[in-house]
Image (tube, rainbow, N blue to C red):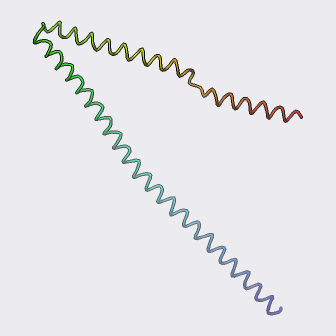
Amino acid sequence: MSTTERQAGADSEHVGALVSRASQQISELVREEMQLARSEMTQKGKRYGKGGGLFGAAGLIGILAAQALVATCIAALALALPLWAAALIVTGVLGAVAAVAALAGKKQIALAGAPAPERTIDSVKADLAEVKEKAHR
């Protein structure tokens, strides 16, 4: 065996060791990055959970504040009218506001149309027709 053949064999082993070590390091790096990502997402998930809970609490407190405002309106009207009349007027106003909101919501839903993605369905149908046409040629 000549010197160049031995040197080529040694280089081949050296390259093989380098490739093996690089593969191992990449594998470790990917594992560490995945562990870091998992840890980061766990931390973010906990924060999102706390934030969502706080938003829910804010919504509940907002509803209670709206109820207190309605009671205040009734009490203010009760200074000039009998209590039953004040409550009836506030109830009528709230009912009218609810009816207007319901009609506006119904109109928006009607304008939205079917919940299916119609443009996407049409596009997929066109793609299928084109594929079928090209398959028959």
Considering depth in this image, is 77 or 20 the residue closer to the camera? 77
Q: Residue at x 13, y 16 (%)?
A: 76
The spot of residue 34 in percent (x, y) is 51, 58
Extreme-bottom residue of the structure: 3
Furthest toward the left, the residue is: 79
Task: Name the quadrant of the C terminus.
Answer: top right
Position of 98 with respect to 118 (left or right) is left
Q: Number of marks in the image?
A: 0
Q: Residue at x 18, y 19 (%)?
A: 71
Residue at image point 56% right, 24% down: 115
Which residue is more in the foreground, 136 or 26? 136
Relative to 18, 97 lies left or right: left
Q: Quadrant of the N terminus?
A: bottom right
114 to 91, vertically: above or below: below
Residue 116 pos. (x, y %): 59, 26
Where, by quadrant of the figure, is residue 134 drawn?
top right
Residue at image coords 55%, 63%: 30
